[in-house]
């Protein structure tokens, strides 16, 4: 490709509204342009990378035996009403009415459509198992689109769905996808982990997120410093052997703590460890109040509470709810004297607390020497807190560290959530109708491109891995008007293209400094500079990743490239 | 691919709501399924064909030097308001509001988006010419979606846009696309013509439609029986040397014609040729009344009227408008006595009419012996009628015939319509800002698939051309439970796949009749049946297109297939 008329406009300055590296670099290197909040065009250079990632995904899906199809973006409201998600999905679902005033959604995901397709097409167990996938533009009206294409409102997804006759079959289909995902992200040369995650609003059980470990991201990953363990902190189990102190139990004292609401303030005021404080939070769990207790240095994990109660909704009580249930305000809540009005659950660590400090259920007042099971009754102890840095890894190997993660993939056991809602059954070998057992598997194709940039760059620009580089070679005649340089560059261009190397030829009449700056920004794996030694057939080769430079005779180029970029 | 778990459900009966062959066959062969009116899924078999057509399009675009990008489907209303199309596009534009109540359209076409992209990225004449394209899902809220994916509301398009510094440059870019389109449709083995068409609501001049000649379709193509001439009848020029009769001009007679409104009725009632009748139609042209006259056996062409007046809107007058301007009703309108109130234009043929019959501008009354230029004044004669079967071809060679056409492509010179509206300029070599000169080029990718089916089928099913067949070979063991057949079929399957033939293996336990019926319906180019002679390594080969059957030894298969399907 000739750069002179190639649409890949570079920017020297960092765009003001881009605050993560991948977003900045994708704008600066002319890979993408914004056309509305969270809505982007892929310019030719970005499109090439997107297509390479798409090809990797397609190859691995096909290799895993999945069949490609293409479902529509436009989805009738009725289907979503049948599954119960028309209401549940909320404002993220983009909705519109057609000219006949019928309601539609723009698909953010396709469980409903594929279930209804398979329902009509698959009658017998003989057609199963089957895994179907598509690579398609998806729509989600994010409240706060950000980080460029990392969290956009229109994006490219690979979504796959598996259909089995049994849960054992689902396990097998799930594992195939899991392996395919590992292959995809390995081929994209990403530093990722498959982490145990929460099943969230999708309904279903067993789920892994494929997370690129990063310094940015919207999820925090807890991982072991000495094993494979990794999990979203939303879900990471806490497995700590607490010890009870031998301290004698004292009697409760009432203390005035005017204006001291946070654990930090109370602990400082009373010159006590945070560990000695009891953190008491009132939640509304499916309309019922629940007081949740954790140790003062721990954080409550509401996902775990949700799972514990198998609840649909878990929310912190509002000021009004707090005062109506406990006749006090947040900051002074405590378990003593209320176990008859409100159910109390507590994290395991609480059981081992002695002579704790807690709120007194009275404004500006706390209690000292509060002891669980003596001064109040806990209805259940359980794992209700977030895992923390320094905790032992739940698999018993090593210590927990944290890293941010960019979610690039998600595999998910749906079970019969959708097949039952939409009546998708198969006849088993006894002729009996059974609901199909489903899995659902997503890869953010465009997001993966951003994750690759986020992980592969330096101060000068992007550093593309070979597998997804838009071109393999950047061929730069220092001065295109100098005849020997032009002729050698053109002949190399032709020769390399003939050998199926992908080459970007900088045939512009720009100054060398401009050309080199653009080249570093684009970040193609190998730069070949045709300069003064062109008369001798000598070119300069630079490896973008290592910065290594060497001189080569044109006759040695093909061999060098074959081992460097293939 | 193994058919037993392949999602390609066949239907024996013709679906009730499908009234063209391609629609019926695509449903029956399990290529597509409807999910809402005009909204379809491509099942795996259909998806493979779609991708093959897509690949052909991509290869020809790249070969023509066009650069691929991907613009968003979501387009901000502001862009369409700037170009003036937010209102003009009407209800076909699908619109929605996001969670912040901002208005957007789902792109049916991308002139606005690409012009604004290029505006920001191209400063100088040095970056031009440039042709950009994408292959993308488009949305159009058709009033009456029909013919399956031939006229859907969500469809796959290739849209390209060229950017030049001059109109001469545009001609060159246009011709490159024109040639690329010819290559695309030739490779798809379609019987097509590039026809001169109307530029319609797009704004611009010079345009060709690539029409697949067919027995169905929404456009009528006038073509010469002995030259390359072909044009949409909307636009085909009429070039007839009329002769004036030598008949003497008589005086007007008033005749009572109670209830005789149509030309057919009047001619029959007066025992006259239709050719002797004057057809008078009142149009409202941009709010002004215009009486249009054509000979009784001709049809008025309102596109030509629109072009003649360079009008925005041309519509037949309503009853109310007719009575308010002419104090009479349609059916009895005529030119005599009104040329002072209403402008009269007439088709060339009218000039040669003598002693004609026309309406009298009075209910139930006609006039005989009306003569143009004597009894009324014509403000302009011109080409205002549709070309007809039997007319001489406008290029002077041969006679006009009609055929229906399926529009699969459209090339279009936009000029500066969008670059001026959106301020997309370049600096020329004198540093002066000039509007970029644009072209726009579309291919209906999914529609092309339907057109291929419409053209290639028989009573038993589809007959895929090699270039786009979803698989090349249908491999059918007659009885999969018979060990020799199963073993030979499996070994052939492996061998052919290794040689990169695309093979569908019918490994189902169905009766042979069912398998053969499905095979004919799917229509893969070559069917290989493994039957009783499997023990001798002999298979039966059937060519779907010709019905030719032969027996071959397995060792001769590869050579045979290489010359048959490659």
Image (cartoon, coloured by chain):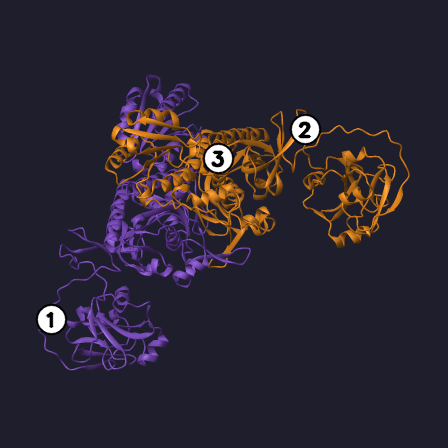
Chain colours: A orange, B purple
Question: Element at badge 3?
Answer: loop
Q: To which chain does the residue with label 2 belong?
A: A
**Residue at the spot of label 3:** A456
Residue B7 visible here: no
Of residues A318 and B509, the one nearer the viewer is A318
Which percent across, then down, holds residue A347?
Answer: 76, 36
Which dot marks residue B210?
none
Q: Please tell me whether residue A217 is drawn above or below residue B337 in the rendered image.
A: above
Which percent across, then down, holds residue A10?
Answer: 40, 45
Of residues A556 and A399, the one nearer the viewer is A556
Give the side of residue B87 with respect to residue A402, left or right.
left
Q: Please tell me whether residue A114 is drawn above or below residue B390 in the rendered image.
A: above
Residue at figure coordinates x 86%, y 29% from the top left: A246
**Residue at the spot of label 2:** A394
Question: Element at badge 1?
Answer: loop
Cα distance, mark 2 to mark 3?
31 Å
**Residue at the spot of label 1:** B244
Q: To which chain does the residue with label 3 belong?
A: A
């Amino acid at each position: 490709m000739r750069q002179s008329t190639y649409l890949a406009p570079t920017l020297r300055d960092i765009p003001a509204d881009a605050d993560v590296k991948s977003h900045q670099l994708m704008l600066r290197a002319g890979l993408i342009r914004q056309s509305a909040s969270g809505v982007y065009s892929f310019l030719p250079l970005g499109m090439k990378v997107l297509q390479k990632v798409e090809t990797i995904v397609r190859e691995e899906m096909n290799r895993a035996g999945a069949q490609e199809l293409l479902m529509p973006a436009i989805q009738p409201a009725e289907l979503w009403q049948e599954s119960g998600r028309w209401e549940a999905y909320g404002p993220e679902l983009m909705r519109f009415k057609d000219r006949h005033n019928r309601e539609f959604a723009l698909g953010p995901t396709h469980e409903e459509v594929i279930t209804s397709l398979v329902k009509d097409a698959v009658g017998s167990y003989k057609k199963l198992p089957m895994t179907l996938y598509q690579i398609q533009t998806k729509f989600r009206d994010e409240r706060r689109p950000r980080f460029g294409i990392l969290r956009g409102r229109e994006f490219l997804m690979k979504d796959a769905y598996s259909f089995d006759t049994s849960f054992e079959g689902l396990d097998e289909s799930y594992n195939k996808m899991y392996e395919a995902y590992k292959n995809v992200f390995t081929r994209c040369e990403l530093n990722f982990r498959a982490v145990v995650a929460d099943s969230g609003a999708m309904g279903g059980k067993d789920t892994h997120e494929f997370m690129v470990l990063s310094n940015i991201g919207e999820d925090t990953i807890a991982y072991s410093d000495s094993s494979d363990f990794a999990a979203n902190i939303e879900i990471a189990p806490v497995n700590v052997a607490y010890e009870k102190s031998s301290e004698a139990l004292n009697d409760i004292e009432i203390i005035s703590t005017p204006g001291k609401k946070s654990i930090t303030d109370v602990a400082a005021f009373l010159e006590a460890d945070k560990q000695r404080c009891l953190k008491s939070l009132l939640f509304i769990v499916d309309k019922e109040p629940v007081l949740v207790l954790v140790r003062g240095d721990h954080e409550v994990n509401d996902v775990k509470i949700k799972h514990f109660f198998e609840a649909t909704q878990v929310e912190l009580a509002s000021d009004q709810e707090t005062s109506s249930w406990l006749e006090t305000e947040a900051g002074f809540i405590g378990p003593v004297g209320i176990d008859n009005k409100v159910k109390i659950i507590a994290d395991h660590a609480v059981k081992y607390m002695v002579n704790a400090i807690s709120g007194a259920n009275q404004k500006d007042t706390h209690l000292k020497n509060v002891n669980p099971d003596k001064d109040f009754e806990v209805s259940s102890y359980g794992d209700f807190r977030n895992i923390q840095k320094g905790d032992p890894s739940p698999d018993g190997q090593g210590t927990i560290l944290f890293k941010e993660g960019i979610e690039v993939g998600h595999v998910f056991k749906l079970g019969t959530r959708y097949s039952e809602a939409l009546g998708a059954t198969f006849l088993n070998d006894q002729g009996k109708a059974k609901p199909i057992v489903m899995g659902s598997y997503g890869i953010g194709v465009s997001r993966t491109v951003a994750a690759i940039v986020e992980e592969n760059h330096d101060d000068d620009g992007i550093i593309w891995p070979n597998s997804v580089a838009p071109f393999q070679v950047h061929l730069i005649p220092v001065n295109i008007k100098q005849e020997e340089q032009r002729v050698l560059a053109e002949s190399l261009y032709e020769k390399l293209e003939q050998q199926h190397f992908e080459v970007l030829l900088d045939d512009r009449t720009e100054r060398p400094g401009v050309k080199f700056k653009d080249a570093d920004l684009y970040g193609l794996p190998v730069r070949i500079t045709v300069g003064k030694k062109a008369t001798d057939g000598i070119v300069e080769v630079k490896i973008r990743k290592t910065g290594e430079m060497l001189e080569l005779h044109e006759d040695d180029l093909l061999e060098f490239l074959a081992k460097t970029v293939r």
